[in-house]
Each structure stands twice: as C-alpha cells, then as structure tokens.
Image: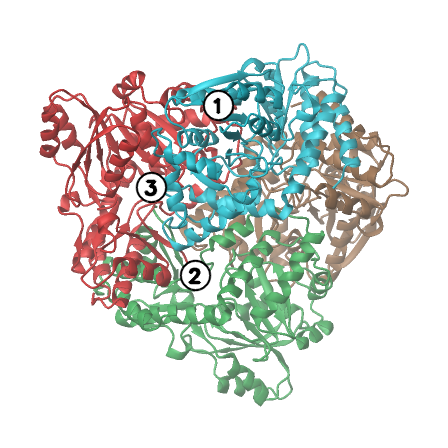
Chain colours: A brown, B cyan, C green, D red
Amino acid sequence: MAGRLFLQIPGPTNLPDRVVRAISQPIINHRGAEFAKLVKGLLPRLKGVFRTERGTPLIFPSSGTGVSEAALVNTLSPGDKVLCFTIGNFSVAYAKLARNLGFQVEEVALPWGSGVSEEQAYERLAADRDRGIKAVFTIQNETSTGVMTDLRAVRRALDRADHPALLVVDTVSGLGSIDFRMDEWGVDIAVTGSQKGLLLPPGLGMLCVSEKALVASQSAKSPRHYFDWAAMLENNRKGFFPYTPATTLLFGLDESLKMLAEEGLPNVFARHARLAEGVRKAVAAWGLKLVAHKPEEASNTITAVVTPQGVDADALIALAEARFNLALGNGLGPLSGKVFRIGHLGQLNELEVLATLGGVEMALRQLKHPVPLGSGVAAAQGWFLENGR
Amino acid sequence: MAGRLFLQIPGPTNLPDRVVRAISQPIINHRGAEFAKLVKGLLPRLKGVFRTERGTPLIFPSSGTGVSEAALVNTLSPGDKVLCFTIGNFSVAYAKLARNLGFQVEEVALPWGSGVSEEQAYERLAADRDRGIKAVFTIQNETSTGVMTDLRAVRRALDRADHPALLVVDTVSGLGSIDFRMDEWGVDIAVTGSQKGLLLPPGLGMLCVSEKALVASQSAKSPRHYFDWAAMLENNRKGFFPYTPATTLLFGLDESLKMLAEEGLPNVFARHARLAEGVRKAVAAWGLKLVAHKPEEASNTITAVVTPQGVDADALIALAEARFNLALGNGLGPLSGKVFRIGHLGQLNELEVLATLGGVEMALRQLKHPVPLGSGVAAAQGWFLENGR
Amino acid sequence: MAGRLFLQIPGPTNLPDRVVRAISQPIINHRGAEFAKLVKGLLPRLKGVFRTERGTPLIFPSSGTGVSEAALVNTLSPGDKVLCFTIGNFSVAYAKLARNLGFQVEEVALPWGSGVSEEQAYERLAADRDRGIKAVFTIQNETSTGVMTDLRAVRRALDRADHPALLVVDTVSGLGSIDFRMDEWGVDIAVTGSQKGLLLPPGLGMLCVSEKALVASQSAKSPRHYFDWAAMLENNRKGFFPYTPATTLLFGLDESLKMLAEEGLPNVFARHARLAEGVRKAVAAWGLKLVAHKPEEASNTITAVVTPQGVDADALIALAEARFNLALGNGLGPLSGKVFRIGHLGQLNELEVLATLGGVEMALRQLKHPVPLGSGVAAAQGWFLENGR
Amino acid sequence: MAGRLFLQIPGPTNLPDRVVRAISQPIINHRGAEFAKLVKGLLPRLKGVFRTERGTPLIFPSSGTGVSEAALVNTLSPGDKVLCFTIGNFSVAYAKLARNLGFQVEEVALPWGSGVSEEQAYERLAADRDRGIKAVFTIQNETSTGVMTDLRAVRRALDRADHPALLVVDTVSGLGSIDFRMDEWGVDIAVTGSQKGLLLPPGLGMLCVSEKALVASQSAKSPRHYFDWAAMLENNRKGFFPYTPATTLLFGLDESLKMLAEEGLPNVFARHARLAEGVRKAVAAWGLKLVAHKPEEASNTITAVVTPQGVDADALIALAEARFNLALGNGLGPLSGKVFRIGHLGQLNELEVLATLGGVEMALRQLKHPVPLGSGVAAAQGWFLENGR
C-alpha cells in the first residue's frame, strides 16, 4: 500500500526516525564500562520525566503489564488487599492481574467514561477502618475510554482518610504526553511502558517507586524473581542489570529522553493538549459523541468516539486501514463495535492530525454516514490557527 | 519540530522506509560476482520502467543534470544544432546547458504554462530544410510550471517533417509517476534522476538510449570521459562500471524497482493521476489558479499554484515549513514569489495529500487570505471517494 | 575507537545487518491483520528450530530469565519440589530463581566444568520414591563454564527411573547454535532468549512446551499473570498477544528464522562446531586449559579458558577491550578473575575467530605471559583448512 | 555466507555504522534553511581535511573520476597541454581522461612500483621552455601499485623550474588516511572521492581548488556545465547547489567529518601507518614481495603484493571471497593475475588486519603455497605490540 501508514492507535506510536537510528546501533557488552555509563546517564533523566527527586526509576525488559505485576509482587504479601478503581478495560485488567497474582481485590467499578473523583475514593478509603487495604490502584489515563483521572484528587482522598495504602498509578498512556508529578502528587508506584509517550518500540516496562514503596518491598512476602526490585536496584547502582537487558531499547531511550528534553516537557504536554482539542473539535463538528462524559476529563492522548447509529465501529476501522492506510484503535470489552479510538500521542503534529481526521471522514462517508466532508478538518484547523505555538 | 515532515516539494520525495533499509546494506566489492549479479538484475527491469525493448539503460553517479549533459556530448559534435522547446525553468536550463557545452541552440521559447504542441514542433522542424538540427529537446513534465507535454505530438511532428533529429526527452519528474513509453513514442534519449518517481535519494542519473542514439554516439566528436557511453556499455555488459558506482543507491534501485513492480506501473500512474486531481480540485475550491493553462496538460506529479493577490508565495512557503512542518516548492525564475508548488509524486497516499492541503489552507489563512478552512480538503475527499482504487 | 567491535561475549552476539534492518521497519498495529499474519508465520517456524511437532512455542517480551520463571509458575504449585542440577553460574541462578518463586529446590551441586551424567541424574530420580519431584531442571549449555550436557542422558535417567517429572531445559546459549531436539529428546519445557543463536537483540524470551507441560499448567496453582501461558495461547491462536508484544523484535525474528533456514540448521550446527574446535585448538596451542573437563562436553558456543598463573583474567579482558576493541566474557562466581570466556556463537565466521584469537594472544603478551604470537591463530587456521565446508 | 564481510579492497571501505545511520536520515528540502545550514557547516570542515585556508572545497554528485574531469575542464582550454606522470593504472587512466577531453597530454611513463621523484619532474618542467604545459598531474597514492609520491618533491620541481603550471593531484585513496597539505605543499587542485578515507558510500566527488586555479577557471574555454565551478561556487555561497545534490551523502559527510575530528587527523594518519606497516611485516614474513620498490614509498592505505610463483592472483582472490568472506583487490593492467591488493584504509583496527592476514594465509595454503600458518599474523602482532597507541 502506497505512502506512509498513519498509525493512530493508542500506542505503539510511530517511531521517530531518530529513535529508529538509535536502536540500530551495534550491541555492546552489557557488562562493560560503556554500558554502565549509558545506564547511569539514563536513570537520572528518567527520574526527571517522572518529576521526582525522591523516587527511584526501574527498567525491565517487559511490556507495561509486566511492570504492573512488579508493582504488586514487590510490595504486597499473598492475600493482601488491593483497592482497584475500574473505569475501563485497562483498569479492569489491572484488577484481574491483581487477582491472578493471589491478592484480594476490592474492585470499585465506576462508570466507563468518567475518571475517579475524590469523593468516590475517599468514601472507600474512609470505610476501611482496619486499614486492610495495602494498595490503591488507579489509572491516570484510561486508554479504552479516553478518560483522564486527576491523580491529585485520589491523593487528597488518601490524605483526608489518613490512609497509609500505597498509591499505585498506571500512567502507561500518560507519561511523557500528559502532566505527571510523582513527588508533588504523592504517587508511590508509577507504571509505564516504552511505546507511547516515551517514543520507543514496545519492550521496556518502567516503574518509578517512592521511598515508602521501597520500604514496603523489604517486608513483602510475595514470591518473585524476574520482577524483583532488590536485585535490580543492586545491579543498577553499578550501571548493570541482574540479567540481560534490552540493550537496543536502552539506546533508544537515551535518544527519546533527549528529544523530550529538547522540546521541553511543558511544551510536549501543551502540544498534546492542542492536538487533542483539535480532534475533539472535529468530533463535535461531526455531531458525534466522546465516550468521555466530562470535557475536562477527556484524554489528551487518545480520543474514544461513539460511532453513529448504523455504523459498525469495527467496519469503520477495517475500512480506514484497508483503504486509507490509517490505523485506528477499536472499542474494547462492552465498547466493542460501538467505539473507535484515535490515538494522538507521541511524535505527532497538526498535519498528521488533519490527515487522520480527513481519513475518518472519508471512512464514515463510505459507510453511508452523512458527515460533511472537511467539517472535522476545518474545526481542527480553526482551533490550531487560534492556538498556535 | 514534532512529527513527520511532509516533504511535498517536487522531489526529492520522501524515502519509503523500504528504500532506506535497502541503501543501508553493507557495501560490497563493486568488482565482485555479487555486484555483477545485482547490476545484471537491475538493467532489464529498468528497461521495463522506460517501456523499451530496443533501448539501453545507463546509470551514472550524478544528478539528472549530469545525464542531460551525457545525452548531448555522446551524440553530437561541437557546434551541432539543438532545437530546444522551452516552456519553463527546467527546459530553459536545458538550453543553457546545451550552450555551455558548445552547441548551437535554437531555442523556441513558448509561453510558460503550456506544453509543446504538434504544430509548434512541426513548424520549426519543417523549416529546417538542410537538416541542421541534430537533436530536438523537450521536457515531458516541466516541474517549474506543472505542465506535461504530450510526447506523441512531438514525435508526430518529427515524423510529419520527416526529420532525422534525435528526440531527447527530460523525464526527470515523470518517469515512474506518469506514463512514458520509449519505444512506442519513438524517444531516442530519455533522461531521468533517482530522486522522484524512482523513490531513491538523489545521486543517480539515468538514461535510456535508442539504437539510433547509439549509432550517433559512434561518430559524435564532443570530448567526453565521465559521461561517455561507450566505456559504460562495455563495462555494463559484465555487470560492472568504468569507475566506482554509487553502490548503495543501486541497492536502493533494486528495492524501488521491486516496489514499482509490486504495485504495477499502470496502478502507479493511476494513483498519481488520482492524487493530482485531488490537489487540483482543492485549488479550484480555493478559487486559485494553476500555472498550467489547460486542464489536460496539468501535471500529475506537481501542481504549480498562483498565489492570490496580496499573498507572497515565498512567505507562504516559509510559514508552511516553520509552522506546519510542510515543505512546498517555490516559484522559479519569473514565477518567483508568485507561485508555490505542491509535489505529489513518489510513495504518496490520499491522507498525505489531505494533510498537505490542510496545511496550505492554514498557511493561507494565517497570511490573511480568506480561504474557507477545509474547503480544499473536502473537494479532494469528494474526488477520492468517487474515484477509489 | 576505530574499526568494528569484536563482540565475542557469550551473547548478545553481533547483530547481523539483515536483522538490524528488519527491526528498523515501521511499527504496525499489533491488533491488525498484518500483524496476525506475521505471528502466524513465525510460530510454526520457531517450532522447527526447537525440532518439535507436538510442542508449542511461546514468545514473551522478556529476557531468558523471564521465561525461566514462566516454565515453573505455569506448571507447578507453591511448595512443589524442583530438582536442579547445578554445574555453573547459570544453573545455580536457576535454583535460586526457583527458591525465590517459592518452590522447594533439591539442588544437586556437581563440579563446575562437567555436565550432568545419566548416572548422576538417575541416582537422584530413583531415590525419589514418592515422586515428590515435579520438575527436573538442567541446562544444555552452561555458559559460565562452557560445558554442554547431553540431554539424552538426562532423559534416559528419567525413563530408567520411570519418573514423571517434567524435564525443564535451559537452552538459552544453545538453541540455534547447537543441536536441540525437543520431541526426540523428550524435553518438556525448553527455555531460550533472542540474543544468542537466534541472532536478535535481547528482549524476547521464548519457550517451547510439550503437551505434558500444558496439561500440568492446567492444574498448577502458582499465582501468575504476565507469564501465564493460558492467556498467551488463547491470543496466539488468532495471531495476537495478551498485551503489547515487542513488535520490532518479532520483525527481527522473522528475518533471523529466514537466515537460519537459508543456511540450514545442520550447517549452522556444523559451523559452530568447526569454529569452536578452532578456538579449542588455539587454547591448546597456547598451553592453556579449558574450564571444561572433558573434550566431548566442551561447548560449541562458548569457550571458558583458565588464565595462566600470574595473569588476572579481568585485567586481560579490560585490556582486550580498551586496546583491541575485543569484548570477552569474564569469569563468574568462583571463576571470577581466573577465567575468561570467548563467545563464538551466532553469525560468525573463521576470520572473526582468527581476529579474536589474535587479540587474545596480544593481550596475553602485553600482560607478560609468553604465548608465542600467532600460535593459536595458526592452530585454528590448520583446523579450518582441514575441515572446510 | 555467515558472519561479516571483510571488505579489504582499496575502497569503498566498510561503512562505519555511524555513517550508515547518518545517511538514513529523512531527506530534507535542498532549497530550505536546514539544508543551507548543513552545507555551510560542512564546507569549512572539509577545508580542514584538505589542510587549507586559502583553498575552496567543492562537492559534486559523482565519483572521483567526475571531479578529475572537473579539475581540467574548469581550468584549461581545448588543446591545452597537461603533463601526466603515470606510475600505475590510475595515473594512466588520468592521462586517458585528459586525452578524451581533448587536451594534449605529455605522458611521462615511469616504472610501476615507484613514485615520482623531484628530478624526474624537474627535468620535464625545465625542458618546457615555452611554458606550454598548463597543468601537471600527479597521483598522491597510486592505488594499483600501492605507491605514494611525495608531493613536496613535485612542488619543489615546479618551483625550481619556476614553472607556472597548475599542480593537479589525485588524492582519492589518500585524503583522510595519509597526510595531505594543500596550502603547505602548494597543490592547486586536489581531487578525491567519498568512499575511502572519508568513510562514505561512493557517490560524492570532491575537489579543493587554490586561488590560482580559480583565476585559471575564469579564462578557461573548455565547454562545461555539470562540473562547472562557477555555478557551484555561486550557489554554495548561500548553502545551495546548482542542481539536486546527493542529500543523504551530505548527511553522511557531516558524520564522517565528526569522526575524523574526534579521532584527530594526526591520529588517523598514525593509525593508517601502523596498520600498513603490520601488513608489510606480514608480507615480508611470508617471503613475498611488494609491488612498491622502495619501503618509504609503500602506501599506508593499500598494499599490492606480488603472488608467488605458481599462484594465480585472481584464483587467490576468488578463493578468499568464496571461502573466507574476504574481499581483496585484484591486479590491474599488466599486474593482472600477478598481484593481489590488501586495502587497509578507513575505519579499521588491528584485529581486522589480523583477520585479513589470517585469511590470506589460509588462501595461499589452500593454493599449495607453503606459507607457514600464522607467520604473517605473528609478524603483524609483534609490530602492533611494539607500536601501540
């Protein structure tokens, strides 16, 4: 198929060519001095992306799911209770993960389409009189619904309830694209992956863990080996890993951290916000609805759109890919067939967004939905012109 | 600057990633068996792209200008007369090239914006009673004005005048994008470069020469060495070159010829025609004019657009690049400042065209020209939907 | 440092340039049809490398250590007993892994420098009257000592003892370099990584599991999620993964499987055997000793050499890297400082081996050990000449 | 064929992986600001490599042969006389080039195997009483014989004879590998290519021209267009080119100039000298003879070796490539079949040289020549150890 693929799924994102070149460097000895220097240069900068001074970043050869597992097995003991706020497919998956690993899960199923509010969180935490809950899980950016939760609200709930549980946050589709502040927001464990805001191919799972989480890990009794923090930390101190790391992706991380630094995190966040609003303006112009209920919670990295009456979302997605070289995300779980998702994260610019919107319009029309051609594009263009850099 | 560059100049074009990988292969011995095999595999397929059975392709490490020189020095003697039809900057440059090389140039300066008609060509050729004209130069696709000449018309003129001059054609921005038929159209020397329809980086100049041109080369007395055909042909027979060839670009050519074959030349031409018409529909929707006077001559690889009153073309181009990561071509010679050019050749698809059009619209608006946002995009979308593959 | 690095560590190996290019392909949608086609094409060929018809291959985004964990948590229940034959650092690490994961480990510590014999295995298995042992772990190629175990011997021991335990084999530094036959040798779970004989960057852990192992996984009670086989198998059937896979490495695997098929596995094994014997001839010519006690157990992928009196192995390794751009492996655990290791696996040829041997000779001389220059090289050359392809 | 190719021909050389990545960058607009900045950054650094302050570097999309043509057509008029000292195949080729271009060539055929001496040059120049000779051509490093000429000697001859001819030097296989000093040595035109000491793929021809040569170009009447300096210089001033440049190779040049600067030219020259002497020590140990007559003229980038009685050089070369993945250069012209050539230029280190020597030894033995295995390797090792960095 001619021309470039528009990979507008919610991640992995298009690899910047700089990253492609970085990961093409020849493998070096992962027990040698050059490697140690690389790693020692990476970790402090990764801390910067998590906006932490007191936290400790950890890098595993795994997907984001792997480090989600790491967050729990390192800090909990078998049977410990985890409070999970579930607002979509990925937070539901987290609750399942916790159950699979042998933890007690108290799942607070909230409506898909909203984030977690302070009151919702407070209510449950305050009710936990005996402090049986050891960890509270929330997702910063629920990729299946395109909804962001204000983590400060969850933190405030914990504080108001004076609850000592660890705050575990999935920021897989958030970090490096939307604001995240480990220290300021009192996050204990942040979990992410390489293939979204960090601009890399999939294959690295990353954590950032607070001092409190490290203390918890010393008494946690869950069996663990691959994802064990202690061995990792000990090796990292010398610039090494307890087992063979994903060397080429670490080369890539070195480059993508440079790219984020060159643009500047605040500019990266502003760009994502601007592009996302352009997409939302287009959706509104089409007369379609977001899965997100509240505008202020609509995600800046992914927009989940409810397909109009009579249009099968999966048919739309298949058509966009087959006909226009445009990859969109599908609806997950109960949203399957009813929702398509537009990813707008990573190394992206206005024209790529316009192309994507233009493609969606053509696909909708081809499926007989009478959206005016160019209407969404024009709405986004207007926004972009009013909100230039 | 975030995201991908939209390199919509009239070439070089965006490198397909397959080509990038092909040219990244390790250098091999250009005097060894593996290399000879590569070259022997390339030449017949290159003939196929020129649509010739009797012609001979030649590849030089040079730009298209280099092989334009090769066309003349191999077939003419000092002081020989060349008839040049000039219809824009690149055909004017060819006349200058011929003069610089010591040939007599009879330049027929036609209006910029039109191609060469049979009558125009016939008139001059018929007037050349003593057959002083040894070569007739015409450009298939004049990149500066976005105008195509029907080469069959020029051939008919030569035939009607029963004129023995060689027909020399510049198809630098045509071959591999718009229809070209060496044998059927009676072209004697076709000249092209690697960086347009052939999807490669710049660095290879290519010719295809007829038997008649080869005969002419045997008596041509122009001094020549680097661009000499005889040495090239002799070496090519064994799969080699008279001097060090551009090995990595030959790797790339192997891949790009595969890509053209996979898509099929007729499909490649149809895609270019479809994308070009989309662009023209947008220009019409904006109420702007093409440099091309006649719709049937408007180029399928490049569209030259007259900027509206009050809009400086170079300001538009600079803004598009700085603000939207969109590279457009500028007006050349007398068109400077009054024309911008949209390249739409090579590995390109509908969404890339929409992005480009969307970018032009935003740039026009930012320069206070009241084009309705989305209007050109919508016009192109409509066309694409009605004219799908 | 000028020129190419000779990365002669026991893995990761030098990436073939074909693999570098393969992993540089643009990311595709891991939920789309093109991806599913890729995966469905990979799995059967991966089976071929494991030499199995009845086994099932599984691919995780992890290192080899990750899938070592997967082998146990999927087939055992907490407190189950694992018999571990330890003959070097990596088999000792496996025993530790099993203990960390909460299993009972019966560790049979054998001398470093030998493999596991049928008698050693039989004795323990026969003694296990109540069949408490659920899994027997052995390593095919112990990378720390450069020793291969004949897996058929261990299989025979199990059969003679009529013991139902699962046979779990680490073939991380074996598969794709030395002969391995899942079905014929009755291996239940084979564990490997991407960065050795499979010619890829590190980042994929792979398993091949027998029907018996799959049955065991259905009743195994160990908590697991990331490394859970059931979810993986269910997704793999459609060509997908339960979470984001390491897409680019799967592109690479596609290419490296092609390379192995082009050379032919028997030829690949013969090449490794030939290169390894060349290295051993050189070591003998230097008057140095292998860590491997028996010639027939000396590894064909890695040679561990005892440094001579007065030569610190780590100084030798550091010098080779700093002065000659040659990366060697160091001694591990009790062998630290006394042993250096020469990796000779992956895409390697005779001249690369000669360069490596020449570099070791120079480094030895620079550390005042009076090895005759060229002596090891000559011994290897002689062998290579007598044992050509 | 397994493992890495040892490309030890006299160029193109192995591409450093840094250069491969550099030339893989996306094409940019060669009429845009980013490109101009690139070019303006390249030219002064290229001057540094030529060791000139007063000279002007010029870059053409061509091979070295192309810029050899450029040297003459820009400075001479038809029929002008060129004095050519020919000492091997490439200097003979230059004389032929000059004749083909219509100049009078006074060819001083010197014995192949020696350089040009001051006396030889002086004699001819002094004899040219009427100053008919307009240019003197000499080659710094004659690649076919592996012989260097001391350019200072030729300069002294010109000065002693008080002869105003331009000194034209081919340093294609010299620049960036062996010392070259444009200003200090009074060179008027230096000609080189990208694919040797400049570490790039073939495809760029480069010149450096003195003020005197520029003055000559203003009155030179040779017809020229593609290789015309005036148009090039005028465009270069703004960072542009008169026609489409080889953009990706310019990206590569930017990187290779960085690499040369990082190592430092004096260190680059010293490394080449050290590696070359290692090769020569090996040839001596084998009891073979160099084509070069005098040790002080033996080239530091290429060693031409006379094959022993009974060994066909081309058979040796074919065997080395087919059996050992080692590409050597063949004998040219009268040396065909009697000479093989070992290239040792570019990004090369000691171990790559040892591998090459080891390969030659095995090939010689396989052709029944009784060279002691390891003898040449040992000789080179001994030299390398005594002459470390």
For mark 2, name the chain: D
Task: Decide: is C32 above or below C121.
Answer: above
Question: How crowded is the residue under tag 2: few (<14 C-alpha within 10 Å), some, or many (20+)?
Answer: some
Figure quadrant of the N terminus of chain B: top right
A210 left or right of A98?
A: left
The residue at which mark 3 appears reads as D196
> Foreground residue, C307 or A101?
C307
Which mark is nearer the camera, 1 or 2?
A: 1
Q: Quick one: SS at disc 1? A: helix
Image mark 3: chain: D
Give the image quarter of residue A149.
Answer: top right
Q: Residues within 10 Å of mark 3 (few under 14, many from 20)?
A: many
Residue B95 lies left or right of residue A206; in this view the side is left
Q: Which residue is mark 1?
A: B94
Residue D356 x %, y %: 30, 56
Residue C52 placement (x, y as % from top left): 61, 74
Query: Pointer 2: what residue?
Result: D1
